[in-house]
Image (tube, rainbow, N blue to C red):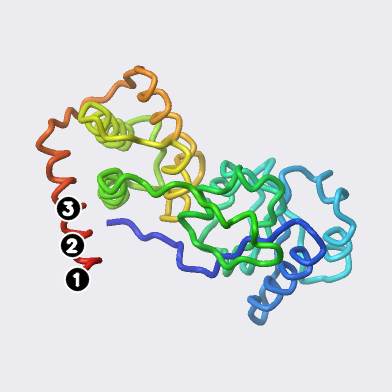
Amino acid sequence: MFDLTTDYPKAVASYDDEGLDAAIEWCVGHAADGDVVSVWTSLVSNLKNCTKLERFVNRYSDVEHITGRGFSMPSPGPVLMAWPRMDGIGELLRFASRIRALCVLTWDEDEIRPWVTAAQPEILGDGSAWDKLTDPLDPVVLEALKSVTLTINLNNTIKAGYEKDDVVGVLRALYESGVPMDGKAMQGWALANGWSGDNPAKLAKYVDDINVGKRPKTSRRLGRSYVDQLREKAAAARTQREA
C-alpha cells in the first residue's frame, strides 16, 4: 500500500584499517555524478575519534559530515554510518529517499546483528563477526510483519492511532497464541523493510513489554483465526521455497 525505499546497495564494514579503507572506497564507488558522500556519526565530536574519517571529510568538497543528534539530512548520495546502533539507523532512514547506498561501520557487532541478518549487506573487511547471525524469525511472525508493513502508513508513528492499534493488536494475538517473538530481531527486520524513525525501536519495545506480561492498549482484538491464517501463509511459503 505504501512505497518502501529499501533497494539501495548496503554494506557493513569492520572497524579496522582494512574495513575502513574498503568502506570509503565502496561509498565513493557508489557515488554518481553530483552526489555527495555523507559521513554520519552520532555526535559532532565522534568524528575526531577517527583520523582517517576526519581527513576524508575535510579533504573533499563532495564529502560532508552529518550527525544523528538533530536528525541531519544527508545530501543525495551514499552514506557511511560510523558506529551506529540500530536506533541510529532508524533515524537516518527517515531520509531513505536520499540514500543511494548505505555502508555501516561497526563498533559493537551485536548492536546491529539483527539488521545485518535481515538486510544481508555486502561484507567489507574482516567478516568473521558475521559467521553467526541472529536466529531466523518464527515463520508466523515473519508473515505477521509482512502483513502489518503493507497495511499501516509507515510515515506515521506507531505510538498512537490506527498504526498503534494494528501493530499492538497483531503482537498481542501472536503472544496469546504462543508464537515466540524476538524484539531485537523484529526491529532488524523492520529496518531492512521500509520502517524508519523510532518505529522499529518502538516495535521492539512493544514486543518486549508483551513478552513480560504487559498489555499495551489496542482497540483491535484479533482471535486465533487470524494467527491460523498466518500459519497457513507460512506453510504455503515454505512449500513454495521447497518446490
Q: What element carries label 2?
A: helix
Residue type marked 1? Ala
Task: Give me the C-alpha separation between circle 3 and circle 1.
Answer: 15 Å
Residue shown at the point (87%, 63%) measured from the top left? 58
The residue at which mark 3 appears reads as 233
The residue at which mark 1 appears reads as 243
Residue type marked 2? Thr
Q: Which of marks 3 and 1 is nearer the N terminus?
A: 3
The residue at which mark 2 appears reads as 239
Residue shown at the point (75%, 56%) measured from the top left? 15
The residue lying toward the viewer, choosing from 23 and 99, is 23
Residue shown at the point (30%, 21%) measured from the top left? 217
The residue lying toward the viewer, choosing from 25 and 54, is 25
Q: Is mark 3 on a helix, strand or loop?
A: helix
Up the image or down, 214 lies above or below 235; here it is above
Residue shown at the point (51%, 52%) measured from the top left? 133
Marks 1/2 in contact by CB < 8 Å: the verdict is yes
